[in-house]
Image: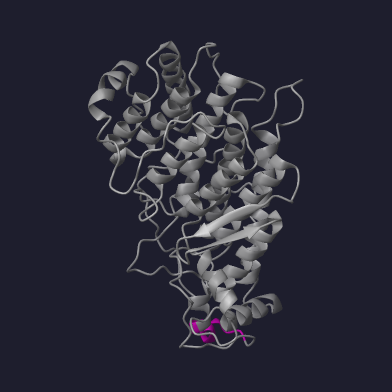
């Protein structure tokens, strides 16, 4: 696809005119600060805002695609940090940066340059917000050097992603129907089919960690999974506790929004500097993006049915271990893509494993909030988050237990590969930075 970046001169000329019309309704531009989190946190939030749908943002990407887009943006910001501070291998390129290079300008230029190409319908809004951000930086050589550096890195990242399948116009075609097979709701868009064919950010192939098939319909494991979700995931379950219901609903928020806000809290709580913040976020979001690609590759390879179909139609599967229930409905509407493996588990486990790699321990305090329930949940150990998500998807009636566990293993494997292949220190620079 054609990748066009706005020239330095045109951006600087537009600053004065755009400075007072950059903030969309209800979305205030971040302040240009000097704290350890900024400007990486500023543009992480800007990316989140542009990618995530309302009410949390102004974008239109469901969690699977949102994770990939966030991975690309954060890889660009990471390469800016490496170019300025050194010590790590770049994701794509780390050109030499002049000593008087503004990190704020460079981070902004890299993130903006990537976003305007990934989100062509938001170009005007993104240009205005970018111009407003730059207008609050001193007009000096450092600013100009920063813009040049950021745009160069954005150009390189975009060249790497050219023809990656993210903008391909492909539609899901139902290959076959029958017991055990996912059949989409024709009244809603089918999600994630294109995602299953996007070139990964770090993996060698979407199917690199493709799991074994789901449990056969006649197996004891499938029968146990079926019975658990039938009892706990029903919309009016009489055995699911209020706490379990709240937990299920908590995780029905847009998980990219939940996780990015949570990651920025972790960075602030640990006092991470610009390089550490850029590296942690890139490791997490590239892992999360590739976990989603790998997950949807498996989903559309196996095409396994959801509990909502399995429980209602189980009489047609010819298996004596399960009994149909025509009145069964999940706690909330099931996402319109195949069941196996569980995408939320894939994404969560990948981010958790990235955090475990970065901090070198499972004992990391993480606070995550949900706009669905209006509550915040705090975890003192990373593995607790994965376990809760696995429970939540069963309690919501979305997934079989074995699908959650498979998704968690897949996400973990992806993140370990990403950490081994990317974002490593250069030879002789010592171990990765940690707080």
Residue extent of the magenta highlight: 312-319
Q: Position of residue 166 (x, y in %)?
A: 42, 42
- Tell me which secondary structure the magenta stretch mostly adopts: helix
- Going 25% across and 29% down the picture, which residue do you hit? 18
Query: In the rendered image, is residue 122 in sight?
Result: yes
- Going 40% across and 57% down the picture, which residue do you hit? 172
Query: In the rendered image, is residue 290 in sight?
Result: no
- Going 46% across and 36% down the picture, which residue do you hit? 42
Q: Position of residue 388 (x, y in %)?
A: 63, 65
Eyeballing the image, is 310 above or below 416?
A: below
Quadrant location of the N terminus in the rendered image:
top left
- Going 46% across and 70% down the picture, which residue do you hit? 334
Quadrant location of the C terminus in the rendered image:
top right
Q: Does the magenta run of residues contain 19? A: no
In this picture the colour scheme is one colour
Eyeballing the image, is 259 above or below 273?
A: below
């Amino acid at each position: 696809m054609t990748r066009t970046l706005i020239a330095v001169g045109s951006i600087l000329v537009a600053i004065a005119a755009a400075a007072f019309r950059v903030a969309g309704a209800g979305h205030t531009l971040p302040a240009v600060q000097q704290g350890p989190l900024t400007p990486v946190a500023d543009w992480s939030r800007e990316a989140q805002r542009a990618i995530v749908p309302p009410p949390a943002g102004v974008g239109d990407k469901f969690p699977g695609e949102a994770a990939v887009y966030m991975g690309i943006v954060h890889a660009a910001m990471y390469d800016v940090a490496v170019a300025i501070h050194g010590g790590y291998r770049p994701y794509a390129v780390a050109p030499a940066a002049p000593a008087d290079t503004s990190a704020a300008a460079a981070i902004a230029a890299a993130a903006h340059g990537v976003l305007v190409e990934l989100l062509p319908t938001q170009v005007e809004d993104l240009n205005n917000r970018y111009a407003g951000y730059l207008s609050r930086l001193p007009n000096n050589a450092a600013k100009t050097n920063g813009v040049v550096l950021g745009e160069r890195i954005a150009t390189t990242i975009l060249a790497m992603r050219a023809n990656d399948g993210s903008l391909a116009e492909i539609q899901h075609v139902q290959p076959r129907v029958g017991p055990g097979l996912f059949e989409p709701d024709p009244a809603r868009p089918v999600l994630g089919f294109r995602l299953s064919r996007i070139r990964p950010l770090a993996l060698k192939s979407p199917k690199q960690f493709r799991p074994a098939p789901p449990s056969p319909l006649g197996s004891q494991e499938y029968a146990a999974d079926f019975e658990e979700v039938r009892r706990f995931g029903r919309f009016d379950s009489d055995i699911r506790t209020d706490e379990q219901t709240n937990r299920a609903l908590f995780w029905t928020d847009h998980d990219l929004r939940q996780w990015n806000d949570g990651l920025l809290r972790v960075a602030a709580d640990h006092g991470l500097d610009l390089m550490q913040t850029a590296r942690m976020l890139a490791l997490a979001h590239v892992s999360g993006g590739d976990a989603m690609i790998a997950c949807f590759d498996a989903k559309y390879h196996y095409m396994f049915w959801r509990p909502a179909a399995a429980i209602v139609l189980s009489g047609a599967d010819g298996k004596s271990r399960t009994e149909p229930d025509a009145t069964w409905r999940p706690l909330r509407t099931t996402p319109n893509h195949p069941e196996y493996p569980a995408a939320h588990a894939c994404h969560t486990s990948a981010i958790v494993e990235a955090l475990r790699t970065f901090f070198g321990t499972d004992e990391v305090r993480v606070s995550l909030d949900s706009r669905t329930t209006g509550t915040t949940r705090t975890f003192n150990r990373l593995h607790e988050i994965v376990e809760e998500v696995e429970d939540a998807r069963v309690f919501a009636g979305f997934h079989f237990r074995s699908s959650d566990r498979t998704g968690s293993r897949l996400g973990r494997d992806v993140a370990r590969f990403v950490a081994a292949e990317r974002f490593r220190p250069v030879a002789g620079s010592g171990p990765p930075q940690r707080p």
